[in-house]
Image (cartoon, rainbow, N blue to C red):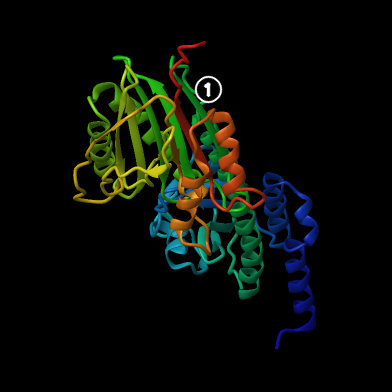
């Protein structure tokens, strides 16, 4: 049974690294303060934190006391390699009584004269975040109590780093997404555009996007898409798809050709990603448009004197599906006064209702008319006062009615 003095000492050390008052520190200051407290209560010469990189295969030195050169030199090593790599691979504490080239791979550790080391994994919500280790210049055998104290500090740091990274990713993703959505839609004689974009309230950033642009031969390109997933990865992929499609649009005779090129590019270089895209080109004389889709929800069109309809455009499989069918073009007349609605699933999909219900509500809400008014009506009908559970993107394009000959 542990003596009372030893118990009191352990509790005091644990309290120092789990103090609720630490929550008042900003992330960088909190990590720095925890390293200082660990160094003091464990009476060690060095403390260092290494974090897992985005690939999940390497550790990178993030913060240190007594081993600042690890951070300044950007030291990194593979999971499973060396002292810290073994801790990460096993997610278990490791102690080294004698530091040597045989026990660690980082030359900084033995060149500075470290003699003994103890390391523990950084884990938050069951996910490996990195490794924390301490070192002593004098011979030392680290005890179970030492391991307990270091693990408590590591758990606190792991949670802090995950929260920080989540906040950074959300802010970066939202900034990236907004920067890639067009500030102004193109001005085209005989056409008018209107768009709405509403981010999800609680579920992070998705990969929804839209675009419209002039093409060199007088056509107008109009596109909307949705990348699977959420957060910064989805926003980054969305940006790549948008840029690639613009490039292919300049070199392609039809939407299907551009989308097939886009599919080949992503299936080869980034096969792990999936996205749906619908792209249409409006003829220079505005009399017709071509539309092609890689698994995206169908456009809705409304012409004067007719009921609005979901346009059948023979979609192929989404980008990211191996051995997908070739994308095909569908040709449609664009009569004066006709409005085309492109949208993402956040507009029509609800958790407790079939998506067909949402599509029918959109079809009923779309009418030929000034697009600003119609946009407002659609958002009021389909969103209203509901919390937005998924990013919502809506893009309307209308061919203006022919001038009244009596005017």
Q: Position of residue 204 (x, y in %)?
A: 56, 49
Q: Is residue 3 left or right of residue 252?
A: right
Q: Is residue 216 above or below residue 265?
A: above
Q: Is residue 263 left or right of residue 167?
A: left
Q: Quadrant of residue 83?
A: bottom left
Q: Position of residue 197 (x, y in %)?
A: 55, 38
Residue under numbered circle 1 = 184
**307 and 320: which one is in front?**
307
The N terminus lies in quadrant: bottom right
Q: Position of residue 396 (x, y in %)?
A: 48, 32
> How many numbered circles are shown?
1
Judge whether residue 107 can be spotted in this image: no
* Residue occupying image coordinates x 29% and y 14%: 217
* Residue occupying image coordinates x 48% and y 34%: 395
**180 and 301: which one is in front?**
301
Q: Secondary structure at mark 1?
A: loop
- Residue at the front extreme, as displayed: 406
**331 and 117: which one is in front?**
331
Q: Is residue 182 above or below residue 83?
A: above
Q: Position of residue 242 (x, y in %)?
A: 39, 32
Q: Quadrant of residue 251?
A: top left
- Residue at the bottom extreme, as displayed: 1
* Residue occupying image coordinates x 60% and y 52%: 161
Q: Is residue 307 above or below residue 163?
A: above
Q: Quadrant of residue 4?
A: bottom right
Estimate how packed mark 1 is, as few (under 14), some (14 to 19) or many (20 or more) residues with alpha carbons within 10 Å. Answer: few
Judge whether residue 50 can be spotted in this image: yes
Q: Is residue 369 left or right of residue 260?
A: right
């Amino acid at each position: 049974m542990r003596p009372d003095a030893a118990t009191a000492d352990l509790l005091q050390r644990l309290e120092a690294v789990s103090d609720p008052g630490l929550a008042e520190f900003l992330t960088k200051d909190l990590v720095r303060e925890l390293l200082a407290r660990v160094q003091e209560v464990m009476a060690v010469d060095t403390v260092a934190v290494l974090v897992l990189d985005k690939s999940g295969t390497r550790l990178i030195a993030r913060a240190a006391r007594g081993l600042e050169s690890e951070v300044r030199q950007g030291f990194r090593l593979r999971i499973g390699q060396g002292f810290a790599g073994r801790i990460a691979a096993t997610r278990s504490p490791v102690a080294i009584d004698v530091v040597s080239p045989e026990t660690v791979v980082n030359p900084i550790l033995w060149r500075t004269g470290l003699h003994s080391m103890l390391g523990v994994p950084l884990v938050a919500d069951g996910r490996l975040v990195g490794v924390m280790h301490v070192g002593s210049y004098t011979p030392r055998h680290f005890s179970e109590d030492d391991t307990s104290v270091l693990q408590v500090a590591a758990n606190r740091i792991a949670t802090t780093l995950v929260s920080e990274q989540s906040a950074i990713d959300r802010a970066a993703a939202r900034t990236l997404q907004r920067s890639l959505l067009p500030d102004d839609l193109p001005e085209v004689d005989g056409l008018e555009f209107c768009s709405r974009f509403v981010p999800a309230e609680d579920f992070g950033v998705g990969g929804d996007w839209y675009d419209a642009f002039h093409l060199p031969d007088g056509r107008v390109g109009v596109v909307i898409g949705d990348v699977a997933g959420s957060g910064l990865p989805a926003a980054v992929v969305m940006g790549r798809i948008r840029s690639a499609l613009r490039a292919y649009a300049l070199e392609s005779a039809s939407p299907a050709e551009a989308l097939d090129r886009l599919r080949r590019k992503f299936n080869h270089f980034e096969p792990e990603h999936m996205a749906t895209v619908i792209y249409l080109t409006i003829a220079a004389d505005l009399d017709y448009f071509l539309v092609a889709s890689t698994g995206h929800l169908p456009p809705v069109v409304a012409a004067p004197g007719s009921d609005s309809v979901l346009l059948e455009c023979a979609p192929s499989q989404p980008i990211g599906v191996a051995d997908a069918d070739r994308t095909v073009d569908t040709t449609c007349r664009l009569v004066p006064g006709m409005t085309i609605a492109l949208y993402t699933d956040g507009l029509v999909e609800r958790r407790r209702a079939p998506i067909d219900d949402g599509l029918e509500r959109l079809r009923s809400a779309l009418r030929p008319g000034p697009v600003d008014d119609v946009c407002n009506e659609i958002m009021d009908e389909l969103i209203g006062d509901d919390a937005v559970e998924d990013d919502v993107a809506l893009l309307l394009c209308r061919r203006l009615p022919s001038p009244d000959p009596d005017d």
